[in-house]
Amino acid sequence: MIGSINHIAIAVPDLGVASAQWRERFGAVVSAPQRLPKHGVKVVFIAASNGKIELLEPLDDKSPIGKFLERNPDGGLHHICFDVPDLIASRDQLLATGARILGSPDPEIGAHGKPVLFVHPKDLTGSLIELQQA
Ligand code: CO
């Protein structure tokens, strides 16, 4: 059901500071910031040789990332995203096994222009997992 890791997302309080740290400390190539109002975040991507790191900053007070940063003011690991070959089949399997989907069970378009959904962390090892249509 799950394929390769697409990205690992880290929530940060300040995207500019975080981008500069990754550039200076690793020589990382950081993308231009992208605003995703539907997800309440501003993101940049950092390419690793076998996947991506996504840095997330809250877009406003209502952002779901805001609560996370209240508990983790320096930032922290927020979610892991896996590619899946059939997102709807994956969703239906999750629901059939009693796992909840965060928000609407209908996938929304994520940061990569592809449909995504998030599994409730309480229903999956306490970790937020994003699934993205491959
Ligand atoms: Co993500």
Image (spheres, rainbow, N blue to C red):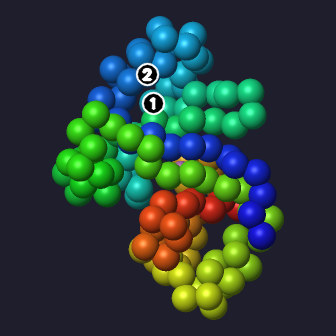
Residue 109 falls in image quadrant = bottom right
Quarter of the picture containing the C terminus is bottom right
Which residue is label 1 attached to? 33
Image: 53 above or below 16? below
Instruction: Residue 70: give x, y in percent of width and height.
Output: 20, 48
Q: Residue at x 65, y 28 (%)?
A: 47
> In x, y percent, where is residue 38?
41, 58
Residue 118 in view here: yes
Instruction: Give the side of residue 100 with respect to residue 58, left or right.
Output: right
Label 2: which secondary element = helix
Q: Nearer the viewer, mark 2 or mark 1?
A: 2
Question: Quadrant of residue 14 in the image?
Answer: top left
The secondary structure type at the circle numbered 1 is loop
Q: Answer above or below: position of 21 versus 5.
A: above
- Residue at image mark 2: 19
Mark 1, Cα crowd under 10 Å, few <14 / some 14-19 / many 20+, is some
Residue name at image x 43 percent, y 73 percent:
122
Q: Pick the residue in front: 21 or 60.
A: 21
Which residue type carries mark 1? Pro
Work out which residue is located at the far front of the displayed protein and give it: 125
- Note whether 118 is above or below 17 in the view shown: below
Picture quarter containing residue 76?
Answer: top left
The amino acid type, in three-letter code, at marker 2 is Ser
Mark 2–mark 1 CB contact (< 8 Å): yes
Q: Quadrant of the N terminus?
A: bottom right
Crowd class of label 2 (few under 14; some 14 to 19; many from 20; radius 10 Å): many
Q: Position of residue 62 (x, y in %)?
A: 23, 57
